[in-house]
Image (cartoon, coloured by chain):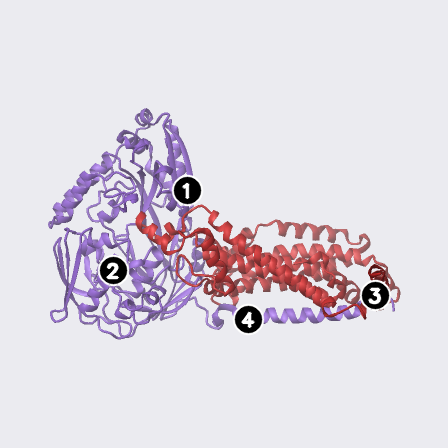
Chain colours: A purple, B red
Amino acid sequence: MNRAETRRPAARRWATVTTVLTTATLALAGCTTGSGNASAPEGGASTDTINTTFNADPTTFSPPQGRNADDYMASRLLFDTLVRRGTDNSIVPNLASAWEVTPTRGVFTIGENGTCSDGTRITPTVVADSLRNFASPDTNSNFRELVFGPGKTTITADDEAGTVTIDVTEPWADMLQGLSMTATGIVCPDGLADPKGLNAGTADGAFSGPYALAEKQSGVKYAFKLREDYSSWPQYEPAIEGVPAATINASVNANSSAVANELLTGTRDIAIIRGKDMSRFDGQKGFTAEKFPIGSMFALFNERQGSPFTDAEMRRSVAQVVDRNAFSQAATGGQGEPYYSFAHPSVPCAVTDASAVLPQDPAAAAQALTGEKIKFLGTQVFGPNGAANTYVSEAMRQAGADVELRNVDLATWSTDSQKPEKWDMTLMGAINAGGTMYGALSVLIGPSTENGGLNWTGNENPELKALVADAMAEEDEAKRCGIYNEIQRIVVEDAHAVPLGSLVAQTTAREGFAVSVFNGQRDESTMRITK
Amino acid sequence: MTTTIATEASRTPGLRAGRRRGPAQHPWVRFGLRRFGGLLLSFAVLTAVTFLIVPLIPGDPAAVAAGDGASAAQIAQMRQELGLEQPLIVQFLTYFSGIITLDLGTSFISGEEVSQVIFSRFPFTAQIALLAIVLVLLIAVPVGMGVAILTRGGRLPWLDHGFNVVTGFIYAVPQYVMGTLLVVVFAVTLGWFPAAGAATFDSLVLPTAGLMFGPACVIARVVRRETAVVLDKDYVRTARGWRLGAARTHLRYVLPNLITTTLTLSGLILAAQLGGAVVIETVFAWPGLGQGIVNAILQRDYPVIRGIILVLGLLATLIIILVDVVLAVIDPRNLGGASHDA
């Protein structure tokens, strides 16, 4: 037997092994692909389904615990609130059909058509229990103070009268608007009895909103089914056109380019696009696109002892070196708008006048900045690799400052910004989910972060705090706006914050689909099929 | 005396095979024990390294988990809830005892079980990685062999150069660029396949294609070189001298000699693709483990990072062991396996 012939058994074994492995691989691929949906493509303008996207997995399905835009989106679909924000900053009925609100009390009449996903009727008691859970220190919601203020809250239900009464010990004029926030979504008894299930989205009877969570595949997709017994739609004026989808499929996709490709190829119907991909829909036939602010950017200073920015002149000099148009170019590729207040223009009482900010004057700024050593903590999310931070730091260097810029990822920024010794200034992209003036102001006044508050600057700003208290106690809206205008003037003049511009996203819908944006805030429960 | 017997035994195959070989001396048993030892070692190293390295990533997981607008007190409470205030040794013991009871913990961010996160994402990574490697073998081996056979002895030099240039060029194209090109041409322009996502069966096509081009070029070049070497061997010349058909000669006497190199390389590529398909997964929004680990790192989700690395590491080790087993089945001389220890 020659040497070649000794190889024959090996060749046969090889062929067998290859065949087995190939068959197994193909079988595995066939078995695991696409959740068995091969014969029914997900895309396309089906008559009862909307395909959309999450940017990331929702971190929770419990409204008070919501932390990011995807949590808010899920909450909007699954939970109703007492009221909603409509066009022109109006407040429209949702579960509450009527209300009387003063700075210290709100009396809400609960409508009769509200039901939970397990059929339980939404009574004043159900509403009160849910709001008590939201307000409870044990729940530890980040939004509690934005809605009810710093005082004590008492919530009582009267099922016979059909009302819920909310009393706060410290006047809080933002209560009504706060109760439109997703964090105050009404959780039904089934969810309150099972906090873990509520968090995971598995408490089937917890939902008070138009949809129930039907499928959840982490990192892949989420399916929401329209509840047949749901009828407490918010009373928007004018009414929203189109019909709600029977099913909303949301895939998880953080890549804006891929999301844009999916829209263009018909795999998705409605999606949010960020960054440079927004321009792919400029003039694109068959699509509607609407830009909306997802945050307002402003420079924020560490005003604690030892920081160069305890000096107001130093802070003003930063305002004087920044060209807002150049900043917008760096931060958003020119898609954003310059802002003249730390609150975005849709916030009630926000100043939108360019004359309110300090004019650009690099020469004057140089007198204060020259030779100053400044620790600039920036996050990479503002512009490509944090280009917005780079622009501001370069503008300051031009004026003679010795800037040490640290462009870090969001997690590191969140950590280091809690350590005052690590930064002198930073750029903040405030989301302001409630769309209230206090929501925007909360990082500038009151107890500092190290003392349990939300104030990043470390300067309690008692003057501003007193003005906020006045505004919160003021029943007359025009007078309240007058106080807020005064607050904005002081913040800008003393440069506690330097307003810069907007962070934008674009809600994009294929022909035949629509979603509404009210006052710069997208409401996912308004997604509709329009033909 | 003992030395003498041992020496005698080693010189006498009959003694070695018959009298001295107990069950523990069987080549497959020794092979299995060696590989099992390697697997245990890999497990120990992976467990220790994943536990120790992950906290070195800058950034506080509690600050991320607490979310926007959280106060320092809320972040501190979150740190307590996540167990990050416990001494390192306590954290390690919790982690280790969890692993040996198949409990990888829960996500810091979503509270979901890590095993569920992995179970949800792994099939997607496995699909494209396995399909890609099968297609790579089905394409690259015949192409590499064909080019070597056609260019043997300096024939068709243009084909040899063309093969080198084309495979070199394709290999040099970054995966990100290749993926984007595939999307632009086959999804956006021609509309043949979905641009992203994993909703339908045809969603597999573009990510798999994006993943296979580079490895196909590497294996085709290796096969071409190995084939050229084998074609010059005496036994192949002898087979030709016996006027065996070309197909029979190449399939029976050339192909089996490429197996060791090809399978070893393929195993390494597959192991790398399981953990390293992140670029393709990002371009095609493919919900696999690669994207999962990137998201987990960005969110400082320690349990998910550790779980995915541990699973991918063990899978890589198992794949290499599987390749060794296959090679040993094909050619028992590989049972010695000195060069392929796990």
Same-subunit check for callouts 2 and 1 = yes
* Marks 2/3: CA–CA distance: 79 Å
- Label 3 to label 4, Cα distance in Å? 39 Å
Q: Which residue is mark 3?
A: A4
Rounded to the nearest angstrom, the CA distance separating label 3 from label 1 is 64 Å
One can see residue B188 in this view: no
The quarter of the rendered structure image containing the N terminus of chain A is: bottom right
Q: CB atoms at circles 3 and 1 under 8 Å apart? A: no
**Host chain of mark 3:** A
First reached walking from the N terminus: tag 3 or tag 4: 3
Please say if A445 is above or below B319.
Answer: above
Q: Residues within 10 Å of mark 2 (few under 14, many from 20)?
A: many
Question: Which residue has dot 1 on it?
Answer: A386
Residue A30: assigned label? 4
Whichever of callouts 3 and 1 sits on the residue coming sooner in the sequence is 3
User: What SS does tag 1 mark?
Assistant: helix
Q: Position of residue A106 (x, y in %)?
A: 14, 59
The answer as to whether the residues below labels 2 and 3 share one chain is yes
Q: Residue B120 in the image: state x and y as whole percent.
A: 47, 65
Could you tell me which residue is drawn at 22 percent across and 37 percent down?
A: A356
The part of the image, by quadrant, that contains residue B246 is bottom right
Considering the numbered disc 4 on the image, is that residue within a helix, a strand or a loop? Answer: helix
> Seen in the image, is A514 located left or right of residue B92?
left
Mark 1 burial class by Cα count in 10 Å: few <14, some 14-19, many 20+? some
